[in-house]
Amino acid sequence: IAVGKFDGKLWKKEGAIKEGTNVLAATGSSDGGISIVLSGSAVLDCTTPAKPQLELNSPICEGGTIILTTATVAGATYVWKLPDGQVVETNSPSHSIVNATLAMSGKYSLTIKVEECESIEETVIVTVNTVPVVSAPAAVCVGSTITLSPTSGGTWASSNPAVATVTNGGVVTGVSAGSATFTFTNTTTQCSNTTSSVTVNAVPVVSAPAAVCVGSTIT
C-alpha cells in the first residue's frame, strides 16, 4: 500500500504506509473518475528526497563526453531518463555518455529514490554541436601558399608555425621544409577539427651559366 499526491493527472507515489496502521482503497468509475479512501492516519516509512539540482557540461561537441552530476544522497537510487526514452538506474550521482552524437541532444531527467520515496523530477537540456568539416591540400612549397577550407566562421592555428603559418582566412604559407597540421575552431560553437598533415617541400636549388653560343651547349 502506498500514499502520494494527485497532480490532476497522475497519482505519484511518495511513500509506503506502515503495515497494519492504515487502509487505502481506490475504485474506478465508468466516467474515468477515481475514488480514493484512506482510513487511519497515514505514516510514511521514508523521507521524500529533495528535488535534485543537476550540473552539466553542455553544450559539448560531437565525440565529446556528456557529464551530468548531482549531490550525493545517502542510500539513494538515481533514475536517469535519456532523450531516446532509455531509463538508467544507478547508485551513482553522476552519469556520463562518451562519444556523444548529435542525436544525443535533448532532455535529460533525474529522479532520486530512497526506499519507497521519490523526489520531484529535475530536467535539463543538453546540446551537442557538430564538429566543423575541414580540408587541406597535401603539400605546399616553401614560399608558396595554399588555401584551407573553411575560409570563414572561425579561427585557424598551425601546429608548427616554423614550418607553415596560417591566417584565419585559411591561407597557408610554407616557411621551411617539414610538415604541419592546422586546426579550425568554429567561433559560435567552439568546436574544433584538425586537417590531415600537410607537407612543406623545400624549393630546389638551381644554377646556370650566364650565356651559351649558337650551336654550343651548357650544363
Image (cartoon, rainbow, N blue to C red):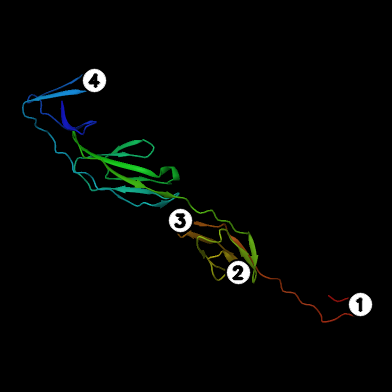
Q: Which mark is residue 191?
A: 3
Specify the amino acid type for callout 1: Ser
Report how far apart the C-alphas of labels 1 and 4 lie in the structure: 114 Å
Q: Which mark is residue 216?
A: 1
Residue 146 as seen in the image, left or right of residue 18 = right
Q: Which mark is residue 45?
A: none
- Closer to us: mark 1 or mark 4? 4
Question: Which part of the image, by quadrant, shows the N terminus?
Answer: top left
Q: Residues within 10 Å of mark 3 (few under 14, many from 20)?
A: many
Q: Position of residue 177 (x, y in %)?
A: 62, 69
Q: Residues within 10 Å of mark 4 (few under 14, many from 20)?
A: few
Q: Which residue is mark 2?
A: 173
- Closer to us: mark 4 or mark 3? 4
Residue 163 as seen in the image, left or right of residue 17 = right
Report how far apart the C-alphas of labels 2 and 3 lie in the structure: 24 Å
Report how far apart the C-alphas of labels 2 and 1 lie in the structure: 41 Å
The residue under the point 38% across, 43% down is 106
- Closer to us: mark 3 or mark 1? 3
Specify the amino acid type for callout 2: Thr
Q: Which residue is mark 4?
A: 31
Helix, strand or loop at mark 2: strand
The residue under the point 87% across, 80% down is 212
N-terminal label among 3 and 1? 3
Nearest the viewer among 148 and 37 is 37
N-terminal label among 2 and 4? 4
The residue under the point 60% across, 69% down is 173
Helix, strand or loop at mark 3: loop
Q: Position of residue 116 (x, y in %)?
A: 18, 33
